[in-house]
Image (tube, helix red, strand yellow):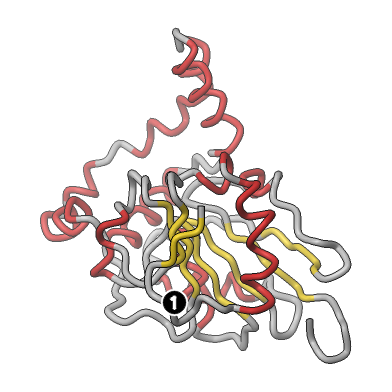
Amino acid sequence: MTGDQSPIHVYFMPGMAANPAIFEHIKLPEDKFRVHYLKWIIPDPDESLTDYALRMNKHIKHENPVLIGVSFGGVVVQEMSKYLKLKRLIIISSVKCRDELPRRMRFAAITGFFRMIPTGLAGYVDYFEKIAFGDFAKKRAKLYKKYLSVKNKVYLDWAIKNMVLWDCDKPPENIIHIHGDKDEIFPFRYIGDCIRVKGGTHVMVINRFRWFNEHLPEIILEGKIKKRKKTQIE
């Protein structure tokens, strides 16, 4: 807590194409924190990540806040943090620099293959739910429909390009990185200093919310792990 016992304002940024519903089960003590949810805004097709971050910063209404970003949202909050004074910068299931990107993404950046991804198909999520068969497919379709609500092609093209081509070779100082050792998008073997969540996948903010409810308040208040190496917390 701050010296005057005022609440800490915590801003959550969802992952690529996701809406704030991914945080629906994460609960922070109301006597210490005030939670705010950021939403994706549609970029201009050629908008730089810097300019986008500056636009997003207009939605930060409190001094010395905490920024928490998931996946590509973790990249965006890192860019936002360059122009803000923060109490804490936290990323989840994300990367801190280009060296942590998996080889397939680096290959996509070199070859330009990411431009061939059919982002226009994002509008067919509703159709996929109707034709899905089998319990797993139906559950996955419902998850897509509930959490992946940003289907704008301009946004998706822009987000994929800026994720793959992100120009960052040095992590921000004092960043706190929480990462699952079963992450299938950003494999754990490429990740440097972080808090390791055993068995955590790329969507652990949804299916491991109890872990976050238990540990996130302490991480925000104390920031004890910011200089440790891979720390395993089950």
Looking at the image, residue 104 lies above or below residue 52: above
Tell me residue 5's x, y (percent).
87, 83
Task: Pick the residue in front: 224 or 70.
Answer: 224
Look at 55% across and 30% down and name the residue there.
143
Look at 40% across and 55% down and name the residue there.
159
Tell me residue 171's x, y (percent).
37, 79
Look at 83% across and 91% down and name the residue there.
3
Image quadrant in which you'd find residue 83: bottom right
Residue ID for mark 1: 50
Q: Is residue 72 left or right of residue 7?
A: left
Q: Amino acid at mark 1?
A: Thr
Q: Is residue 83 visible?
A: yes
Badge count: 1
Answer few, some or many: residues within 10 Å of disc 1's Cα (few below 14, many 20 plus, some between 14 and 19): some
Image quadrant in which you'd find residue 107: bottom left
Looking at the image, residue 221 lies above or below residue 186: below
Looking at the image, residue 117 lies above or below residue 91: above
Image quadrant in which you'd find residue 34: bottom right
